[in-house]
Image: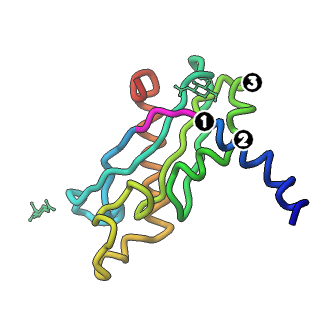
Amino acid sequence: MLLLCLLLFPIISAQEEGYSFVSKEIRTPLDHFSFSKNNTFLLRYMVNDTFYKPNGPIFFYTGGNENLEVFAQDSGFIFEIAPQFDALIVFAEHRYYGDSLPFGLFSPPEYMGYLSSIQVLADFADLITFLQKNLRHVWR
Ligand SMILES: *[C@@H]1O[C@H](CO)[C@@H](O)[C@H](O)[C@H]1NC(C)=O
Ligand SMILES: *[C@@H]1O[C@H](CO)[C@@H](O)[C@H](O)[C@H]1NC(C)=O
């Protein structure tokens, strides 16, 4: 038990320091594979541009089945390597989690079909396309 506490301590204290971001949202279609794309929702993403230099890459980290802050605060490696690459750091939230809720906290069962990995990947593709087009001014 003591050993476990000792092992966990560095992790916990690293988390307490916290990484900082600017929180943003992008409007994306609820159904990326339908002809009618007028049903949309706001997908949250977080950006840290401190290490970014023009022509640097985007380090794009996808959230999973959890609030986005959990992934952003647990992924120190991204912050360690970003300065060497002049990278823009972007964390994107998984739909139906955290603040990216198309139908609020409790989605009616008939809308749960939009919670699929293919739709989630399409959300991320949409966001990456947007970031690449607007790299200079999206996060300011
Ligand atoms: C980005 O992260 C670095 C390292 O944690 C931090 O010093 C900086 O303030 C952050 N920048 C923004 C815009 O939050
Ligand atoms: C989407 O567009 C169709 C056709 O214009 C309209 O009937 C429908 O109400 C729209 N849906 C939303 C959510 O705006």
User: Which amino acid, by three-letter code, is at mark 2?
Assistant: Ala
From this view, report whether residue 60 is shown above or below residue 3.
Answer: above
User: Which amino acid, by three-letter code, is at mark 1?
Assistant: Tyr
37 and 137: which one is in front?
Answer: 137
Mark 3 vs mark 1, foreground winner is: 1
From this view, report whether residue 51 is shown above or below residue 5.
Answer: above
Magenta residues, start to end: 19-23
Q: On residue 14, which mark appears?
A: 2
Of mark 3 and mark 1, the one earlier in the sequence is 1
Name the quadrant containing residue 8. Answer: bottom right
Seen from this angle, which residue lies furthest bottom?
Answer: 109
From this view, report whether residue 117 is shown above or below residue 77.
Answer: below
Q: Quadrant of ligand 1?
A: top right
Which residue in the protein does label 3 denote? 84
Q: CA distance from mark 2 to mark 1?
A: 9 Å
55 and 98: which one is in front?
Answer: 98
Mark 2 vs mark 3, foreground winner is: 2
Q: How many discs mark residues in the rendered view?
A: 3
Which residue in the protein does label 1 denote? 19
What residue do we see at 70% from left, 40% from top?
76
User: Which amino acid, by three-letter code, is at mark 3?
Assistant: Gln
What residue do we see at 30% from left, 62% from top?
102
Q: Is mark 1 within 8 Å of ligand 1?
A: yes
Residue 83 in the figure: left or right of residue 44: right
SS for tag 2? helix
Q: CA distance from mark 2 to mark 3?
A: 21 Å
